[in-house]
Amino acid sequence: MPSKAAVSRLSTLGRWRLAEILFWLAAAASVPLLTEHHLVLTEIAIIALFAVSLDLILGYAGIASLGHTAFFGAGAYAAGLFAIHVTNDPLLGLVAGAAAAAVLGFATSFLVLRGADLTRLMVTLGVALVLGEIANKAGKITGGADGLQGVFMAPILGRFEFDLFGHVGYVYSLVVFFVLFVVARRIVVSPFGLSLLAIRDNPLRARAIGIPVNTRLTAIYTISAAIAGVAGALLAQTAQFVSIDVLAFHRSADALLMLVIGGTGYLYGGIVGAVAFKVLQEILSVWTPQYWTFWIGAILVAIVLIGRQRIGNGVMGIWARLLGKGGAA
Amino acid sequence: MTILFDGIAYGMVLFVLACGLSVTLGLMNFVNLAHGAFAMAGGYATAILMNRWGWPFVATLPLAFLVPALIGVLLERTLYRRLYDASHLDQVLFTIGLVFMAVAGTDYLMGSRPQLIRLPEWLSGRFEFLGMQIGRYRLFIVVVCGVLTVALQLVLNRTRFGSRLRAAVDDPRVARGLGIPVERVFMITFAAGSGLAGLGGALGAELLGLDPLFPLKFMIYFLIVVTVGGTTGLTGPFVASLILGIADVAGKYFVPDLGAFIIYTVMIVVLVFRPRGLFVRS
């Protein structure tokens, strides 16, 4: 029997705070207010969703992954192929992307759970590399290095057609992002989410108090993979194209960087990081089109040297203050 | 047979490239994904000296060792040593950052085109030996890397420095208590490992190619060597690099469609069944 205190603690955790509501209102306000930036905002929504999915395993379950883009890419290719060969209904495509990524996540979770820290990093990296190699070599199915072309989507729910300026695409991505974010948020404030934290902090003790560690980790790994798959599927559908780049190593590294910038273990870190990352990328690539990765690297080095935790706390502080002043996110 | 020989030469280069990493990662437990950047520095040192200043190939090799070794000392003193105790994730993030910087920086300084290294007359071409086609350059590599391997084994197992290093790795606190200058031992090891990587980069430039993306392209190969080879010293990584070299060359020759697929799969399988590598200290 869960004690009354525990239940009330969980429900306090689960309550939506004013800052969060203001944040999502601000996000909704970007639809009518920032119409000329919808293409970039779509990208941000997608990579933010991807970063949130990584946060579920890294920040909550403590599984460091160097190959999370395997699921992003699997979702993207699955959605693209589904649209070409089965039906081009967007929502069914998302389900296909999520399902493909979830199956892959479930299958590889057993590999990932076998080893400790370092082995996990290698295995996740290896899985992503194998997938990248498959996508590259199976040119007949995936288009190989040229990417998957000819992904045409039907109107969403049969009514809203994707337009050239990405307005519909943005609203669509934002809504999907919001729905999945609510799901992820619900998961982490559930007893299941708390047990993940216990596993992260001390797997041995978690096992001793009766938490089925491996089952829980498999579950969250699969969920996280499915969400990453949806992010990939969104990219495939809004860009109407799947580039082999969705499986590239730098995508996994970028997602880690976003979490490092925004902080891990509170879900909003992925969003803050995604926004910061995209803004940085835009500024840097205008400034030095070819060499912006140098500065991205420099930022990573600097962040680690200063200390992730300290920066994370700083960001959270600033962010809380910003939201307190009216939600200019 | 020629394939076997090419595979051995390839594996030898991989070993020289990766043995530094097998010490930092395998023994010192520091995840250095930027190891390939040091190899690239060595390769570029050779390429610049040969193509711009007309040095002969062999004369550039000592510098291909020294330049990355000096960079290694510099970075170890200023940055790396702060992270010896950090979590693996921090080390990974930090060294990925270094890789990104190295890739973009090299691109900026040297251009993105692959660097060509013209081998001297006496190293190019092939000759026949017992019915085998043997490339002169491949033979040269096998000899040089073979000598290096033996020398490394001797240094690690027979010299005072080697035993100090092993002691420092096994238990830094006790080693320090016994008066072993642990920090200096680590620094020298790190520098030597980086230098060897550079030498491998220079020797392998002809086989592996050399362009700014080198650290990313070969990162996984080094990691395979180390993780599959385990941490028993240098024998494990040596065997692992030979297997990897032969498997890769043979795979690309017989089933080119599969590409690098085979070696990645082998790595995953090995890691799943032997999470600590094929050769584990008992």
Image: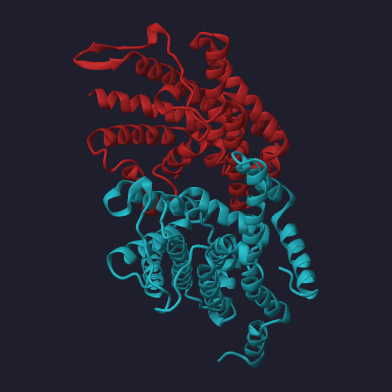
Q: Quadrant of the N terminus of chain A?
A: bottom right
The relative height of residue A280 versus residue A19 in the rendered view (above or below) is above
Q: Position of residue B14 (x, y in %)?
A: 43, 30
Q: Quadrant of the C terminus of chain A?
A: bottom right
Give A14 or A326, whichever is nearer the viewer.
A326
Give A226 or A175, whichever is nearer the viewer.
A175
Where, by quadrant of the figure, is residue B257 drawn? top left
Q: Position of residue B277 (x, y in %)?
A: 42, 45
Q: Colour of chain B?
A: red
Give B160 or A290, whichever is nearer the viewer.
A290
Q: Is residue A133 visible?
A: no
- The number of numbered discs placed on residues in the rendered structure image is 0
The relative height of residue A69 versus residue A322 in the rendered view (above or below) is above
Q: Position of residue A85 (x, y in %)?
A: 28, 65
Q: Position of residue A208 (x, y in %)?
A: 53, 74
Where, by quadrant of the figure, is residue A43 drawn? bottom right
Q: Is residue B102 visible?
A: yes
Q: In the displayed orientation, state which residue is furthest to the left.
A: B131
Q: In the displayed orientation, state which residue is furthest to the top.
A: B122
The relative height of residue A117 versus residue B234 in the rendered view (above or below) is below
Residue A264 placement, left or right of B248: right
What colour scheme has been applied to the protein in the rendered image? by chain
Q: What residue lies at 49% left-to-right and 22% top-to-bottom?
A: B202
Q: What residue lies at 32% left-to-right and 53% top-to-bottom?
A: A142
* Chain letter for the cyan colouring in the rendering: A
